[in-house]
Amino acid sequence: MKIFILLLLAAGPLSAEWGPAENSAAAALAGARVETSVISAVPLPDLLAARDLASRPLTIGGVKFLSTVVFDAAWDSWFVLKPAGGGLGAGAWKETDLAGGAVYNHGGLELRLQETDGVVTVQAPGGEKAEVSINGLFDLLYAESLKIKFGDAVTYAMFRNLAPLSEEEGTAALRIGSDGLYYYSVTPDSKIEAEPRWLLAINWVLYGLRIKDGSLLFVSKPIEMAPEDHAAERARPR
């Protein structure tokens, strides 16, 4: 069986804003005046509470921390280290900048961070060390976050994202491609308060996200489209 899939959001763009090509494709797909249906919904506080469960615990210098990744407005990944159990004092560093090293101070404890070949080493005074794999953090996010399967074909892990610096709230969608790589997109809440943002189309149905009444809605909308009009993917079991 052939399953025609068009992914409307690519992974890791130079800017999170859609370009002319993406806007044109999305507009053409969504142009049909048909009703949008809600597939399911999850309260935003529940998604936020699940975020820590998808983080890696880390104890160093006698202090318990959580480590994870978040994404900025350009969808670049940042390494986050924060006290376990909540509270202030989280630190965030752009992954590509950690090769040059960084210093994190928390409650008088000074930690030195260094990234080498995708692994962040966290070192406390006295030489105590802990290592965190960035790929391992992506694995945790995919394994432990809420899953949604669109069109019985593409499964996404969905989790909340707080952009560093701007602190803009949003939702990240993470999937595993047929090539075994991770692909993700980030949708700010402000982009989907008035109308959905479509992630992909499967067999002439659009699937996407919407924020309403404090919940994240997973929505769909039928479209009319000829197979030859857009590039298609062929899905098969991994």
Image (tube, rainbow, N blue to C red):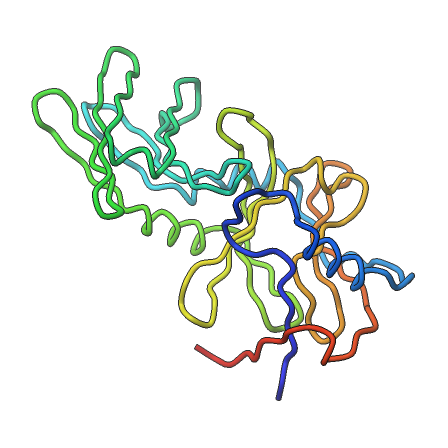
Q: Which residue extends farthest bottom?
A: 1
Q: Nearer the viewer, residue 157 or 196?
A: 196
Q: Nearer the viewer, residue 194 or 212?
A: 194
Residue 226 location (% of width, % of height): 78, 79
Count of all numbered marks drawn on residues in the image: 0
Q: Is residue 85 above or below residue 159?
A: above
**What residue lies at 8% left-to-right and 27% top-to-bottom?**
127
Instruction: Give the quadrant of residue 56.
Output: top left
Q: Which residue extends farthest top?
A: 108
Image quadrant containing the N terminus? bottom right
Image quadrant containing the C terminus? bottom left
**What residue lies at 59% left-to-right and 30% top-to-bottom?**
168
Residue 68 location (% of width, % of height): 38, 39
Instruction: Give the quadrant of residue 94.
Output: top left
Q: Which residue extends farthest left?
A: 126
Horizontal relation, residue 138 to residue 107: left or right: right
Residue 91 location (% of width, % of height): 37, 24
**What residue lies at 74% left-to-right and 58% top-to-bottom?**
26
**What residue lies at 63% left-to-right and 44% top-to-bottom?**
187
Horizontal relation, residue 69 to residue 14: left or right: left
Q: Is residue 58 above or below residue 85?
A: below
Q: Which residue extends farthest front?
A: 20
Residue 210 location (% of width, % of height): 73, 47
